[in-house]
């Protein structure tokens, strides 16, 4: 198999009746998913889609999402999944930047689509809306997709080096990054994941993160690789830990992948002791530090599950992983482990030359799951993708992760800090993650974030934001407790207790939003 | 409506559609007052200012994120002096202001 679009077709040939996706009590079988996605591909081709045209998908959670994803791939186009929570100007930015000409959506988004089309005359076809006079073009309703449904995928001439999808980052800093994966890099990740976690047709993968994120590529494509089912909780269920736990139990979910925050909520408020989640055999987490006390509790609550700390980014998929040893308290902070079979890693200094083991440097990654590059941004590609000469007159192409890591004595890599989270305070180098770790080790604190703000004198001052529901907690008390854990220069100048931390769509702490919130009022209006 | 706005058929309907529960419009003033305070907190603290929120509006699908939903639980516990257990954080108790008010009154009696 060489194309991502073939995953569903092959699963459908083996077991057409097997469930592909379950959401809100409804099931889509692999046979039906294949037929409907071929129907969408034919609709798009009929609307004039050329090979490698970008097909944007703007849908909320539901069974239409996999149809749209696989349909876009089967048409020979490149899929552009859009965050369904995006405001119209963000949708417009993504459509323009990718040069998308086709949009797949749903009736509930008609107003947003109408507004979007007013700014995007390049869009030549819209699938998913009923005909009416309020749009500048004649949309194609979803019923056409059903009418054109067929077992056979259209012939498109797509090869494995063609674009499969372009993912966008949250863009809270302005312009979103657009990350292009080919059929080959996407499939390499699905193959690796299905193999590493021994995914089988009877597995059920949960889908926690929004379908436009790189987490969802595991939930949907690795599941399809194995012919397994993906269970998609409704947005309401995702917000109520006890409902989510009940869904996981009812659906007998076997594999979970998310940021740690979602698991912390589940552990604290999911009532896991009273349920039976023994079907859960793998819990994968990535993206942030998992606070040790919460992880230890969750492992006690889920004794049947193995835990895997995976490391990567949208640019590389997953490149290293650390399976927590069973029955042992893991080291703190958790290692990011060793390179996956699809990746090779290098720890380098500022000159991009390899460092001796044990020294801290930037992590470079090469491998078959690495992106083709940033869409439409040659300058960013020159910065992020670097060549290093190798034997035979060839070059290796490495992705610069921007993360600082260190090789431990046991061969595992340890994450030290994001290069941009390492700050200087009065001449001392401070890692903000270390400050956050110290904060979270304090008993009443549920979540913590540390950020550095300029002190106006060329140095930085650290501010911390914590979440706690302990009424006895006070900034004064927290700062006193921290004094015993951190060197004086690393103790935050100020601690603010907030009801919650702002988060990006994948659930990572939104540092840009925090910074904005903590900056003094007058700075907001400085420009 | 986007597909994610559909009611979850796997869970019981909000208790107000249960014929055993009095219609909040004619019930004791307690219910109306509880609903009013819940809605005031949602409008003042949890959603963008100016957002209209009705008593039957679906709070969980679009209006609140997971953190705001938890804050609503904390508010209800303090405001109405009830204990909210982990098992109470379920969709049917928090779906609408009507459903949450109903849960609050049940929790006060237990």
Image (tube, coloured by chain):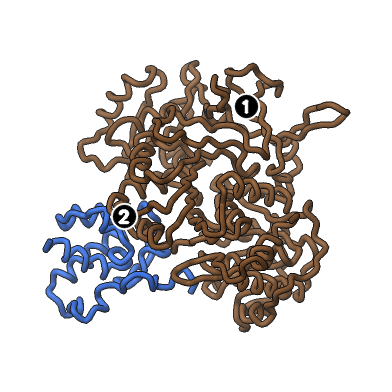
Chain colours: A brown, B blue
Label for residue A275? 2
Residue A360 location (% of width, % of height): 58, 21
Q: Residue A275, located in which quarter of the rendered image? A: bottom left
* Residue in view at x 61 percent, y 47 percent: A195
Q: Is residue A263 left or right of residue A420?
A: left
Circle 2 chain:
A
* Circle 2 SS class: loop
User: In terms of depth relative to the viewer, which is nearer, A272 or B91?
Assistant: A272
- The residues tagged by marks 1 and 2 sit, at their Cα atoms, a distance apart of 43 Å
* Circle 1 SS class: strand
Residue A499 location (% of width, % of height): 32, 46
User: In terms of depth relative to the viewer, which is nearer, A277 or A494?
Assistant: A277
- Mark 2 neighbour density, 10 Å: few (under 14) some (14–19) many (20 or more): some
Question: Can the viewer see residue B109?
Answer: yes
Label for residue A455? none
**Residue A295, relative to residue A359: is it above or below?**
below
* Residue in view at x 25 percent, y 65 percent: B100
User: In terms of depth relative to the viewer, which is nearer, B91 or A13?
Assistant: A13
Quadrant occupied by the C terminus of chain B: bottom left
N-term mark: 1 or 2: 2
**Residue A74, relative to residue A457: is it above or below?**
below
Q: Kindly indicate whether the residues beneath marks 1 and 2 are on one polypeptide chain.
A: yes
Residue A370 location (% of width, % of height): 69, 42
Label for residue A362? 1
Extreme-right residue of the structure: A393
Residue B48 location (% of width, % of height): 39, 58
């Amino acid at each position: 198999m060489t194309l991502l679009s073939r995953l569903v077709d092959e699963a459908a040939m083996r077991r057409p009746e097997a469930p592909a996706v379950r959401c809100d009590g409804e099931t889509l079988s692999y046979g039906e998913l294949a037929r409907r996605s071929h129907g969408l591909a034919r609709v798009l081709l009929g609307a004039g889609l050329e090979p490698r045209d970008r097909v944007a998908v703007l849908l909320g959670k539901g069974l239409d999402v996999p149809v749209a994803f696989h349909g876009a791939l089967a048409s020979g186009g490149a899929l552009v999944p859009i965050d369904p929570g995006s405001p119209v100007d963000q949708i417009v930015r993504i459509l323009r930047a990718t040069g998308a000409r086709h949009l797949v959506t749903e009736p509930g988004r008609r107003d947003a689509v109408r507004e979007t089309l007013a700014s995007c005359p390049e869009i030549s076809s819209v699938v998913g809306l009923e005909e009416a006079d309020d749009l500048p073009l004649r949309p194609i309703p979803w019923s056409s997709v059903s009418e054109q449904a067929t077992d056979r995928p259209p012939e498109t001439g797509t090869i494995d080096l063609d674009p499969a999808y372009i993912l966008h980052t949250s863009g809270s800093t302005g312009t979103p990054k657009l990350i292009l994966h080919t059929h080959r890099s996407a499939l390499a990740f699905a193959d690796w994941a299905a193999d590493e976690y021994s995914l089988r047709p009877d597995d059920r993968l949960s889908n926690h993160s929004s379908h436009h994120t790189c987490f969802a590529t595991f939930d949907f494509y690795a599941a399809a690789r194995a012919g397994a089912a993906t269970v998609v909780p409704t947005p309401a269920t995702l917000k109520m830990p006890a409902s989510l736990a009940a869904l996981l139990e009812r659906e007998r979910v076997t594999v979970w992948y998310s940021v740690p925050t979602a698991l912390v909520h589940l552990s604290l408020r999911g009532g896991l002791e009273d349920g039976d989640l023994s079907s859960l055999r793998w819990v994968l987490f990535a993206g942030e530090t998992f606070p040790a006390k919460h992880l230890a509790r969750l492992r006690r609550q889920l004794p049947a599950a193995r835990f895997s700390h995976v490391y990567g980014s949208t640019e590389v998929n997953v490149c290293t992983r650390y399976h927590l040893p069973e029955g042992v308290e893991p080291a703190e902070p958790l290692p990011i482990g060793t390179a996956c079979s699809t990746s090779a890693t290098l720890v380098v200094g500022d000159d991009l030359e390899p460092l001796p083991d044990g020294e801290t440097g930037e992590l470079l990654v090469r491998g078959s799951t690495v992106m083709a590059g940033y869409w439409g941004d040659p300058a960013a590609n020159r910065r992020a993708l670097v060549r290093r000469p190798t034997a035979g007159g060839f070059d290796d192409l490495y992705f610069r992760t921007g993360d600082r890591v260190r090789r431990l004595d046991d061969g595992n890599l340890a994450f030290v800090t994001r290069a941009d989270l390492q700050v200087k305070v009065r001449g001392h180098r401070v890692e903000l993650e270390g400050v956050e770790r110290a904060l979270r080790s304090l008993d009443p604190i549920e979540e913590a974030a540390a950020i550095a703000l300029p002190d106006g004198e060329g140095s930085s001052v650290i501010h911390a934001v914590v979440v706690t529901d302990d009424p006895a907690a006070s900034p004064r008390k927290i700062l006193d407790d921290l004094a015993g854990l951190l060197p004086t220069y690393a103790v935050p100048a100020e601690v603010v207790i907030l009801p919650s931390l702002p988060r990006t769509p994948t659930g990572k702490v939104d540092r840009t939003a925090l910074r904005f919130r903590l900056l003094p009022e007058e700075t907001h209006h400085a420009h | 409506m986007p597909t994610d706005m559909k009611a979850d058929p796997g869970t019981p309907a909000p208790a107000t559609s249960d014929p055993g529960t009095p219609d909040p419009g004619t019930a004791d003033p307690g219910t109306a007052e509880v609903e009013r305070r819940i809605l005031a907190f949602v409008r003042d603290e949890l959603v963008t200012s100016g957002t209209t929120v009705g008593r039957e509006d679906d709070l969980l699908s679009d209006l609140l994120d997971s953190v705001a939903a938890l804050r609503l639980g904390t508010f209800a516990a303090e405001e109405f002096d009830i204990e909210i257990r982990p098992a109470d954080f379920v969709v049917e108790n928090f779906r609408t202001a009507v459903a949450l008010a109903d849960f609050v009154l049940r929790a006060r009696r237990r």
